[in-house]
Image: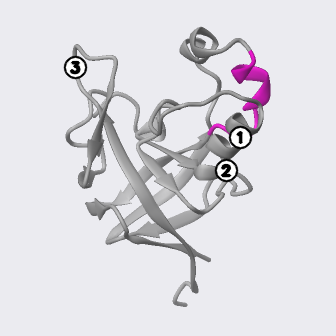
Amino acid sequence: MQPTVQPVGTVTNLFVSREGSSSRVVMSSISLDEKGILEDKYYDKNIHRSVLITSQESYLLTNDHNILLPRGALGENILTDYNPYHLNAGDKLQVGDVILEISQNCTMCDHLSNIDTRLPELLKEDRGIFAKVIQKGVIQKGDKIHLLN
């Protein structure tokens, strides 16, 4: 039986982390395989935490509390206009020609407290979700996101 495909959103920004740098690098596209994002310093470290997906709603929430963060500050690889935080482990998204499987909710990192001590409590359910790569490919800014059922 073929899975149903439901369009749910769009990729608005892409980021990677580089070795030796604390700043995020804005990308127009990212290449992924089963070990993660090829250009990212976390490539082949933990496949269940290969890709961090964050919703723009997280940044709107911080803005509502007068915490102004640049995009990428939450550590995401993929920023979307879709809020995926209701998804469960095992749910699948197709982003461009890549298929991602949700693996777990994102836990709070200590570095967020360094930005603002309110962030861990404020974003405890709204920072992002981790996914692993099921089907390799390329994701580009502007790609459509589809929920696979």
Q: Quadrant of residue 36?
A: top left
What span is colored magenta in the figure?
Answer: 118-127
User: What separation in Å lies between label 1 and label 3 (alpha carbons)?
Assistant: 27 Å
Of 10 and 59, nearer the camera is 59
Residue 25 vertical placement versus 28 (above, below):
above
Report the front residue among 33 and 119: 119
Q: Amino acid at mark 1?
A: Asp
Q: Which mark is residue 57?
A: 2
Which residue is labeled 3 in the image?
19
Image quarter hosting the N terminus: bottom right
Residues marked 1 and 2 touching at CB (< 8 Å): yes
Would residue 74 be found to the left or right of residue 133 on screen?
right
Can you name the residue that lies furthest to the bottom here? Answer: 1
Please report the residue visible at 64 percent of the width from the left and 23 percent of the height from the top.
Answer: 108
Name the colouring of the figure: one colour
Mark 3: amino acid: Glu
Residue under numbered circle 1: 126
Sequence order check: which comes first, mark 1 or mark 2? 2
Looking at the image, is mark 3 or mark 2 earlier in the sequence?
3
Tell me the kind of residue under disc 2.
Answer: Glu
Q: Position of residue 91 (x, y in %)?
A: 61, 62
Please identify the quarter of the rendering in which residue 60 is found: top right
Between the residue at mark 3 and the residue at mark 2, the CA separation in whole angstroms equals: 28 Å
